[in-house]
Image (cartoon, rainbow, N blue to C red):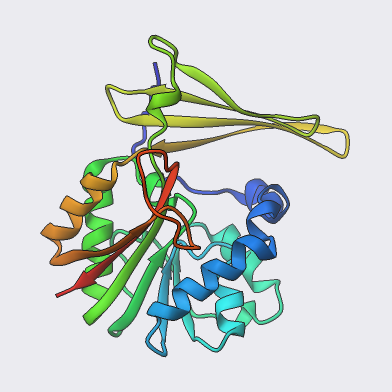
Amino acid sequence: MISLDDRGPHVWGADIARGYDRTTAAMSAAEVLAPTVDFLLDHAGGGPVVEFAIGTGRVALPLIAAGVEVRGIELSRPMVDELRRKPGGEAVPVVVGDMATERVPGEYPLVYLVFNTITNLLTQQQQARCVRNAADHLAPGGAFVIETFVPPLRGWPPGETFKPFEVSPEHLGFDEIDTAQQLMVSHHYDLFEGRATHTTSPHRYVWPSELDLMAAHAGLRLGERWGDWSRSPFTDESTSHVSVWIKE
């Protein structure tokens, strides 16, 4: 079973940061980013807004290009270094630290956290603190938006602990799961320019209803829940959700 001696937030190192945009290129495609930016614009209230786990700026930079000032929190300094290398990235204010505890001064109409990153916090307590921290950043009536996966337990045969999610000439990926601890580790084997690498990404998967309870304890109420950024209905077949909680 999975053994994680360090339950601190997962930190992306320099090697992963350098290849991050390449390995997640599909998430930067126009058909993915355009509805993401449109959705966030609808909740931005003219800005400025805060992105938790801003990373290399995949979402922040297009949102800035659309006219919204973005400020960020990011735990990984190498990821911030990659952001700084991009046009306009050097001007984005970023606090380097834990999104569960760090503050960006001010009150905001929108805080958002995308691409499953809430699950990089590896305990329920850390995730709850992150939701509370988001609420503390919001002005009254402000929105906290999370995009994350629905725990894929329906696709796991009983007794299995490993399941492939991608098999290609460039990438072999499989998940390892421990339902007793609500943990999942994604294993990635990549072949690029003749070099093979192995990386892991630990997650604490979290149910939509569990996030709703965390939000309620932080003074937020559920405003919307969709199956994706294009506002497809959220159903029992949805593999992810985009949820919006409003500060009372």
Quarter placement of the N terminus = top left
Q: Residue furthest right?
A: 194
Residue 74 appears anywhere in the view: yes
Q: Position of residue 172 (x, y in %)?
A: 68, 28
The residue depicted at 88 percent of the width and 33 percent of the height is 194
Quadrant of res 75: bottom left
The residue depicted at 30 percent of the width and 58 percent of the height is 100
Is 18 on the left-hand or right-hand side of 114?
right
Quadrant of res 77: bottom right
Residue 9 appears anywhere in the view: no
Is 92 on the left-hand or right-hand side of 172?
left
Viewer-proximal residue among 164 and 82: 164
The residue depicted at 54 percent of the width and 80 percent of the height is 92
Q: Position of residue 44 (x, y in %)?
A: 40, 81
Viewer-proximal residue among 85 and 27: 27
Image vertical order of residue 198 relative to residue 157, above or below: below
Is 80 on the left-hand or right-hand side of 19?
left
Quarter placement of the C terminus = bottom left
